[in-house]
Amino acid sequence: MVLGLAANGCCNAHVDSAIAMAKFKSRRGFRVSSESFPLFLPKEVEKIKDPFAIKLAKRIERLPVQVTFSDSPIMSSCVRSSRHELKNPIVLLHGFDSSCLEWRFVFPLLEEAGLESWAVDILGWGFSDLERRPLCDVASKRDHLYQLWKSYIKRPMILVGPSLGAAVAIDFAVNHPEAVSKLVLIDASIYVEGTGHMAKFPRIVAYAGVAILKSTMLRLYANKLAFNDISFSINLDCMHVGRLHCLFPWWEDATVDFMISGGYNVVSLINQVRQKALVIWGEEDKIISYKFAVRLHSELQDAKLHQIPECGHLPQIEKPRAVADLLVKFAQTGSC
């Protein structure tokens, strides 16, 4: 499971976003100044060549979020559109050990469609300032998202969760139904018992495992496992995007804290979801079988299921246009 989840930063040479990548490569002499990026990002952001990732990274900001489990606010990273409406905004979560950059292809498409959108980093991952080492267990992640919603979004939202982000979304929707109007679950990683045996590891062993999770070789291999026919150059750039948040000094502590806390176990919560839901699944997902999509669809009270052909575990990266179209239609009409 770790291998599949570690691939959250990659993209496929055959996806529709590859066309833009090819155009980008043809622009000789293109360089990005470090002054264009937020100063809090790791300097390794300069290694990224993907123009969509570069553009979204420049828009990352930190907002102070006062949580109940800390006396000090957490400067929390996100990307938000300049458009603000009375309608329900779309709030995009990400997968395990990933960041808001996972939405680099879909986010601009949602903005083009005129939808207010937020790409939010889940506490413990992404680019928030965790210098004070706050708790990063499930309850803390839930409270952090709720306080961010309460302080800034303030309206029922369409909450989108891919992979492990689907478990985050289900947990949040059941505990704070007033904050969620609709739910979108993408290749959901929910039928697992939290972090399993890893929760019982001694801390020294947990830290050793997390160090491996950050390794470039593992992430390159995870990319190859998750997608078909990905070139080395694209794989390498996607690895830099997906690994960028791991370079903060608090990343290992936050990830170990989550792992030994037991992680998400939301199977018993699925039938408690009251919101209308859309389940999206990559037809060729080799990480999580389609049978779990069928099971999830049957266990939700009010859900629609949509498969995306020629797509693996991360449709938001492989097929961003298809995902954006589904999100826009679901937001506007409730159907897909």
Image (cartoon, rainbow, N blue to C red):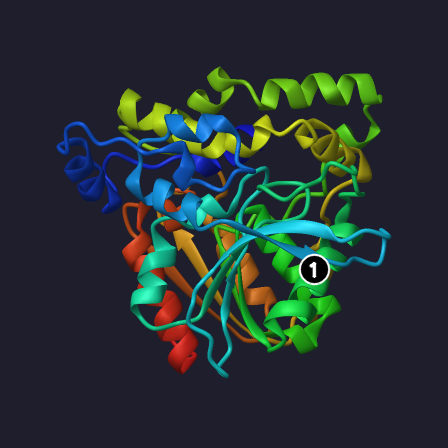
Q: Is residue 139 above or below residue 211?
A: below
Foreground of the two, 104 or 60: 60
Residue bearing mark 1: 171
Foreground of the two, 244 or 35: 35
96 sits to left or right of 115? right
Foreground of the two, 289 or 25: 25
139 sits to left or right of 213? right
285 sits to left or right of 189? left
Amino acid marked by disc 1:
Asp
Res. 272 in view:
yes
- The single residue placed furthest to the front in the displayed view is 35
Query: Quadrant where the C terminus lies?
Result: bottom left
Question: Residue 289: percent from the left, percent from the top?
Answer: 48, 44
Q: Is residue 279 above or below residue 330?
A: above
- Determine the residue positioned at 72% across, 56% down: 144
- Please, what secondary structure does the residue beneath circle 1 have? helix
- Determine the residue positioned at 35% across, 65% down: 111
Question: Residue 10: percent from the left, percent from the top?
Answer: 39, 34
Count of picture labels: 1
| Residue 285 placement: quadrant | top left
Res. 182 in view:
no
97 sits to left or right of 107? right
Question: Residue 45: percent from the left, percent from the top?
Answer: 44, 31
Q: Is residue 32 above or below residue 59?
A: above
Question: Residue 254: percent from the left, percent from the top?
Answer: 72, 35
Foreground of the two, 62 or 87: 62
| Residue 257 placement: quadrant | top right
Query: Quadrant where the N terminus lies?
Result: top right
- Determine the residue positioned at 43% across, 58% down: 280
Q: Residues within 10 Å of mark 1 (few under 14, many from 20)?
A: many
